[in-house]
Amino acid sequence: KAGVTQTPRYLIKTRGQQVTLSCSPISGHRSVSWYQQTPGQGLQFLFEYFSETQRNKGNFPGRFSGRQFSNSRSEMNVSTLELGDSALYLCASSLGGSDEKLFFGSGTQLSVL
Amino acid sequence: GDSVTQMEGPVTLSEEAFLTINCTYTATGYPSLFWYVQYPGEGLQLLLKATKADDKGSNKGFEATYRKETTSFHLEKGSVQVSDSAVYFCALEGGGSYIPTFGRGTSLIVHP
């Protein structure tokens, strides 16, 4: 069974640009969640989608948005990039119930110059 | 709100030493507790979990016991290996949120 796939693996952008990250979950998983990981803040929850609907949302500004398609693939978009958005962005998929094991991708390393 | 506090790292040990990584939590109700591990260049993987008080989760020689009276879920291993070098995250999930709350992670470095 293929794991969670995130693309691209690395990304370099400049301030003010926008970026789209992609996540393909494990087949059969209906929940996809996104996390931002930085050395200073650790792992911070961005949002979670379940069956194409945003079910949970973290405390990030509106510049961070996402969506989920009917095949459960998800995209995350960040507009008007700031230097502080440089981070490893991780997505995780699960079946979507409570206490479910999360399966993480290897992440997209975003650098904003 | 829910929160998880882990000991700060890095924790540096010699091979075959005993490992403890402390984790305490604050939550309403009775959350499920998890340890995830992140190897260099990879995403997180579930290491073990416990869903109720006094449960012991175990995997790959690692153990953690859900202690409700001390709101703790400390990770232990009797003899670490160089290959255990990674970042370890304690997490909880409760209240039907479907989303775990993670601690900030503890880096473990094991020397030969």
Image: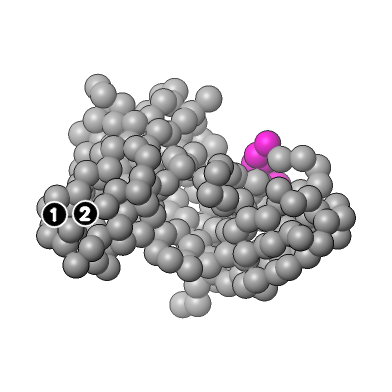
Asked whether the beta carbons under mark 1 and mark 2 sit within 8 Å of each other, the answer is yes
Residue located beneath label 1 in the image: B17
* Residue A53 counted in the magenta span: yes
Numbered label tally: 2
Residue B77 x/y as whole percent? 18, 52
* Residue A10 counted in the magenta span: no
Residue at the image point whose x is 26% and y is 24% from the top: B70
Residue A61 x/y as whole percent? 77, 40
Residue A45 x/y as whole percent? 59, 44
Q: Which residues are magenta?
A: A52-59
Residue at the image point whose x is 27% and y is 43% from the top: B21
Look at the magenta stretch and give its main secondary structure: strand
Q: Amino acid at mark 1?
A: Ala
B68 on left or right of A102: left
Is the residue marked by circle 1 packed among few (<14), some (14-19), or many (20+) residues within 10 Å? Answer: some
Q: Quadrant of residue B53?
A: top left
Q: Nearer the viewer, residue B3 or B110?
A: B110
Applied colour scheme = one colour
Residue at the far bottom: name it.
Answer: A1
Q: CA distance from mark 1 to mark 2?
A: 6 Å
- Circle 1 chain: B
Residue A101 x/y as whole percent? 43, 54
Q: Is residue A24 visible?
A: no
Residue located beneath label 2 in the image: B13
- Circle 2 chain: B
Per the image, label 2 sits on a secondary structure element best described as: strand
